[in-house]
Amino acid sequence: MKTDVLIVGGGPGGAAAAMFLAREGIKPVIVEAETFPRYHIGESMTGAGGKVLRDLGLAEEMYRRKYPTKQGVKVYGQSTAGSWFVPVTGRDENWNIFEWDTWQVRRSDFDKMMLDEAVSRGATLVHGTAVKPLLKGDGSVGGAQVRMADSDKVQEIESEVLLDCSGQATWLANRGGVTGPKYLGAYDKQIAIFSQVVDTIRDNGGTRETNKDNAVIFYQKKFHWGWFIPLDDQVVSVGIVCPSAYFLEKKESIRDFYIRELRELHPELSRRIPEIKLVEDVHVIPNYSYQVNGFCGKGFICIGDAHRFIDPIFSFGLTVTMREGQFVAPIVRAYLGGANRDKANPFAEHQLFCETGIDVLEDVLDSFWEHPLSFAHCVYSRYTEYMTDMFAGRIYGHERQPTPALHSFRKLLKREGERERSYETADQYSIPIGSRYHPERAAIWEVNSPVETTEKWLGPR
């Protein structure tokens, strides 16, 4: 089987890439191992994530499905000074800011909608598991071996470009020898424990800040926080993130730990859940922070979580993967037409573009953890408009980054100038330079994915 573009992974990144490729006249093949709908975490979108769906012409469908409309995020700190609200905003063609909304989504339903829409627009869906990449004589990626779901036979699918949209499975990086090494991140020693709850108390006022469907975050202390994300009129996704050492010290089962944390993490969280009624199993994800060096090359591009993930606290993951799926479509079209075929990395410019954008997120997140009161001051008064841009996910060079707010954060973190120097040569810019870099550990390689079962990670409880 041959195709111009092979996409490994049919989640929102792969589906968005397929739809934007269809606009370029390219009908890709999507390989997906799982049968949708399936449970998944990462339910909140930023303003820029909502814009991707509007660019795809899906806004009417999102409203028809009655996904909760998010108008902002409220962060409750341990004091009034440390609590703040950031509205969802957009920018018009003249770069004037305006109030907007985006969506919270139940991923089982949303991901299936996206994949079905990609197929309806011309993508071919292959149910199977990508086993390993096909390599050409010059070392470039030329497709993948796929174990078919219906027959268990292995089929070769040849491609001119392979897009790795496998998310935290980091499929291509974990095969070794194609991308560069994979590094642990600054937040790799944390775990997320989460479920879904009903009969909660939500805001229900007449302002954007008190919109009942907003995302709410509860800050307990450094690296220890919770989320509250409405999924429909009844169900709310609630998660706890903390250092793994803290969890192990408690010597509790996953469920007991989760229920106790709902009561103890923050008084505002416990107020909103007067009686704990779970409608989903309690799940755990350990060690989720990483970065893949050299995530683009001859015949391949890694998208979204397939090359980098930092920290889920402000819900950037879904936005980044869909935006990168949008960005690659014209680049792939140009490559198929002959652009940059003679270069060692035909997609080096795109790689740098993505890396500098996510560096913006990392510096924002690190500033939040290291200097929370200064961060709150920037949100409230000093850099309010710039902060709404970053919270919306407008993090890339064409979106007027870096801003004065980002320069201020980099000075606080003692990274001003260090970032710029790291981008000067193609073989250096994607090497981690901030708090995420652990040189003593070198590269890491998981067997399959950082998303593991409770029993595999902790042993039977």
Image (cartoon, rainbow, N blue to C red):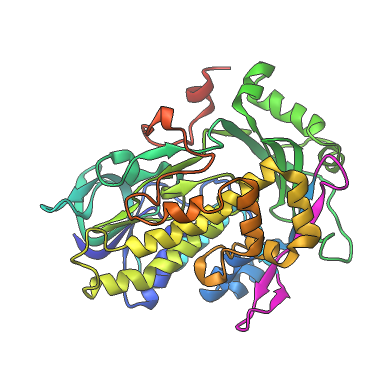
Identify which residue is drawn at 24% across, 69% down. Answer: 340
Q: Where is residue 411 in the image (x, y as percent from the top left)?
A: 62, 51
Q: On the rendered structure, is 256 left or right of 94?
A: right
- Residue that appears at 74% across and 44% down: 372
- The reply to whether residue 162 is visible in this rendering is yes
Q: Where is residue 398 in the image (x, y as percent from the top left)?
A: 51, 72
Between 216 and 411, the one nearer to me in the picture: 411
User: Magenta residues, as a range?
Assistant: 77-100
Can you name the residue that lies furthest to the bottom here?
A: 94
The residue under the point 59% across, 32% down is: 190
Whether residue 118 is visible here, answered yes or no, is: no
Q: Nearer the viewer, residue 128 or 82?
A: 82
Quarter of the image for residue 343 reads bottom left
Q: Please, is residue 21 above or below residue 248 in the view?
A: below
Q: In which quarter of the image is the C terminus?
A: top right
Where does residue 314 sit, x and y in percent of width and height?
A: 65, 51
Could you tell me how many numbered marks the image carries? 0
